[in-house]
Image (cartoon, rainbow, N blue to C red):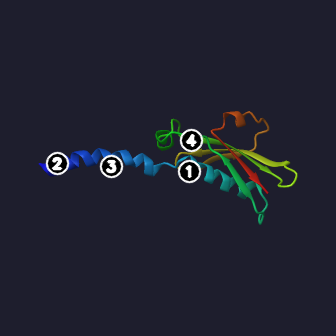
Amino acid sequence: MKARWILAIASPLALAAVPITSQAGPREAVDACVSSFVETYIPEHRVVRVKKELPETKPLTMMYPTKGRYTIALSAHEARSGKEVAHARCVVSTRGDVIVLDSPADSSYVAKADFAVSVGR
């Protein structure tokens, strides 16, 4: 009888943990986009600094995102002049897979982005 009671409590807890382990959080999503951005837009052998502007989120929001993807605005700037040398929009799934990495001419995506990342060279 005691074993059934323990199993009845443990089963829902185990199922509740599944989304946590199968989804990438915002930090993992940003890391995947930054990696793809640097590989695509920054010349090899350049040292870069990354500044992530992640909004404060509630724990349940990070574990259970309301949509199936994150949109991240990325930009790269010269260290000395501050001049922008590249910008891009990255859409990444909650599993951490980069779906889209492009540089649209219209910068309206920046206002709609979930996160912003600045890469300095």
Tag 2, which secondary structure? helix
Residue name at image x 59 percent, y 41 percent? 70
Q: Quadrant of the C terminus?
A: bottom right
* Element on which disc 1 rests: loop
Mark pair 3, 1: CA separation:
22 Å
Helix, strand, or loop for circle 4? strand
Disc 4 residue crowd, few under 14, some 14–19, many 20+, Cα 10 Å: many
Furthest residue to the right? Answer: 81
The residue under the point 67% across, 48% down is: 52
Do residues under tags 4 and 1 come within 8 Å of each other at their CB atoms?
no
In primary-sequence order, the first of circles 4 and 1 is: 4
Contact flag, marks 2 and 4 (Cβ < 8 Å): no
| Residue 113 screen position, x and y as percent | 66, 37
In the rendering, at what x and y percent does residue 61 appear? 50, 39
Q: Residue at x 71, y 37 (%)?
A: 110
Side of 52 relative to 17 (left or right): right
Considering only order in the chain, which callout, 3 or 2, is on the residue closer to the N terminus?
A: 2
Residue 4, numbered circle: 2
Q: Report the front residue among 33 and 60.
A: 60
Q: Which residue is mark 4?
A: 69
Judged left or right of residue 4, residue 11 is right
Mark in front: 2 vs 4? 2
Mark 2 Cα-neighbour bin, 10 Å: few <14, some 14–19, many ≥20: few
The reply to whether the C-beta atoms of the residues labelled 1 and 2 are less than 8 Å apart is no
- Indicate the amino acid at tag 3: Ala
Q: Which mark sits nearer the N-terminus, 3 or 1?
A: 3
Of labels 3 and 4, earlier in sequence is 3
Residue 46 sits above or below residue 88 on the image: below
Q: Which residue is mark 1?
A: 96
